[in-house]
Amino acid sequence: MNTDPIYHITTRSDWRKARSSMLYHPSSLESEGFIHCSALNQVCSSARRHFYGQTGLVLLEIDPTVSGMKVQWENTTGGEELFPHLYGPLPVRAVLRVYDFPPNPDGNFSLPAGLPARGD
């Protein structure tokens, strides 16, 4: 079983709500049935694709062994790359770190300081 951290991008306000309820329950859980996550090397490309230029974001570093859920590695869009998905609300205690995640001046994203530079 892979125990490397996985990552999820969300808004600062949604994370604030999760901290008060102790469960993170994003809208994708209702609409798609899972929480979209990324491996470290997928974070920047996922951010570029789904959050280009958006401000007010945070990057959650998640310990999948604490989440209480099996991580499903799959591609739901027909591509070849597999992404980690969590099928249920995320307990706040499974989040190891929260990083501010602002876009660069060009609208793209770089990994926050403190993370290994393995993103693309």
Image (cartoon, rainbow, N blue to C red):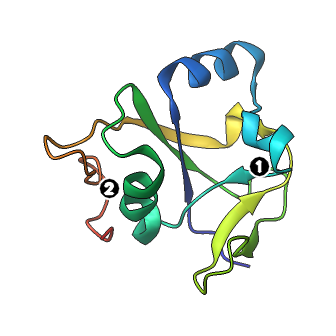
Determine crowd level at label 1: few under 14, some 14-19, many 20+ residues with C-alpha closer than 10 A: some
Determine the secondary structure under disc 2: loop
Name the disc covering residue 24, or none.
none
The single residue placed furthest to the left in the displayed view is 105
Q: Residue furthest bottom?
A: 80
Residue 52, percent from left and from top: 35, 46
Check disc 2: other Cα within 10 Å, few if <14, some if 14-19, many if 20+: few
The residue positioned 33% from the left and 67% from the top of the image is: 119
Image coordinates of residue 64 in percent, x first then y, are: 70, 58
Res 17 → quadrant: top right
Q: Which residue is mark 1?
A: 67
Q: CA distance from mark 1 to mark 2?
A: 21 Å
Residue located at (23% from left, 47% from top): 113
- Amino acid type at circle 2 is Leu
Q: Which residue is mark 2?
A: 115
Placement of 55 over or under 96, stated as above or below: above
